[in-house]
Amino acid sequence: MTSASLIRRVDLDFLLLDWLGADRLAEIPRFCDLSRETLTALLDLSETVAARHFLPHYRTADGVEPTLDENGVHILPEIGAALSAYAEAGLFGQSFAYEHGGMQLPLTVAAASFAHFLAANIATAAYPMLTVANARLLTAFGGEALIDAFARPEIEGRFFGTMCLSEPQAGSSLADITTRAIADGEDGLGARYRLTGNKMWISGGDQDASENICHLVLAKIAGPDGRLPPGTAGISLFAVPKVLVAPGDFAGERNDVVVAGLNHKMGYRGTANCLLNFGEGQHHRPGGAAGAVGYRVGAPGQGLAIMFMMMNEARLQVGLGAAMLAYRSHRLSVAYAGERAQGRPRGAAPHARPIPIIAHADVKRMLLAQKAYAEGALALVLYCFHLADLAETAEDVASRQLLDLLTPVAKTWKLGMGSRRQRHRHPDPRRLRLHPRLPRGAALSRQPPQPHP
């Protein structure tokens, strides 16, 4: 697989500059440092890093899956090297504020940059995708101690992040989760809890490529009687590190989080997809006690509302990944059709040289249909990120409402491209938001809005 067909710059320039006018986002004070030169340099850098470090092990990572032993999960060394190169280029921090160590670029531009990595190697790209979304949630709703402890190292690319929602017995029915949290005092990182339970299908749940991992875990705080509250209203959110950090009480100790098994996800075999056990107390006992140490993010009972921020960013990024798989496939199809010779023009002599199949009308029709789907899919996702930029910076209610509507479409339509029979149940668009809005007057408390019933 060559790098020549990752993304044609003329296509990306048309979408970003001619259509969306991404360079005009510099008129918004937050993005005043953005220029066309900056955008071009970033895309050049992204193309280079993706082609040199992500693309070469694409096939290898699909065949050499992560392994699990008593020391944890081990991933292909080339994946770790690629992620180190990504971090050294500063690309984890593209869309974060200067105050948090980021480049303060629009989400639209960061998405265009990340598209190169998804086109080159979608499995390796899953690690920064989840890490960035994890850090964004923490910078929005975590206290300064949590931001310093977890978000900043993630923005630097030293720590990676996950989202832990589903459970083996509950699947995607979050109302039925049984992971429990018991209050365990407070330390320098905030309100501390001990978590016990299981989480399934956790991408990046463990690996040996980062210094640490911050798990964002949905759990229910047990009541005085020990019972868990029913439904989704009682779900809270916790930051649970693999290795405990300062200024917490147990800094340097291994947390009570272990990998119970690995899942095998087609197309993402290079991504360590794990079953995680929290609070076993058999291998690790931080502070001498069983239970995974976690720190509450936001108020009790508001975990699901807060987690929608990361969930919706992940939805758009998964949609972008699907678009880039389609786009990459189209570029390879065009290259192959231009090389494969078969058949002759109508009326040609029998001994005439065969022509490339791209010259046949029906092949042209199929390639044009593929092009329309792939480039249209990329356009839709970039448009969604553009709406997110407008909604966040200009208080544009219409953009925010349209983003709410298009977020599930941007994910599910492209994942089902080409299958007219496939049906999708989209989540209630009223509950979707890439960046949940705080109620008026609640900015200092960082309390998110309650989800719709």
Image: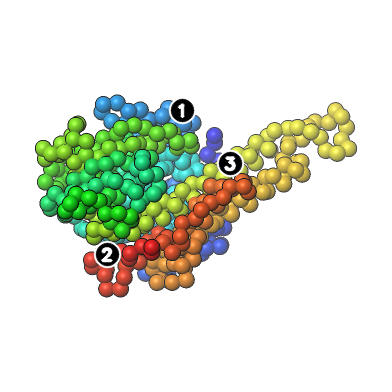
Q: Is residue 438 left or right of residue 125?
A: left
Q: Position of residue 424 (x, y in %)?
A: 53, 51
Point 39% across, 68% down: residue = 393
Say whether disc 1 or disc 2 marks the residue closer to the N-terminus.
1
**Relative to the observer, which residue lies in front, 362 or 191?**
191
Position of 61 with respect to 163 (left or right) is right
Residue at the disc numbered 2 = 447
The residue identified by callout 1 is 63
Label 2 SS: loop
Q: What type is the residue that disc 3 sits on?
A: Ser
Do residues under tags 1 and 2 come within 8 Å of each other at their CB atoms?
no
**Figure check: 288 above or below 110:** above
Amino acid type, label 2: Gln
Q: Point out the frontmost of discs 1 and 3.
A: 1
Q: Residue at the location (45% across, 53% down)?
A: 316
Q: Is residue 197 above or below residue 410?
A: above
Residue at (31% x, 70% y) in the render: 439
Q: Is residue 82 left or right of residue 2?
A: left
Q: Is residue 337 left or right of residue 328?
A: right
Query: What colouring style does the render use?
Result: rainbow
Label 1 – label 3 distance at C-alpha: 20 Å
Per the image, label 1 sits on a secondary structure element best described as helix
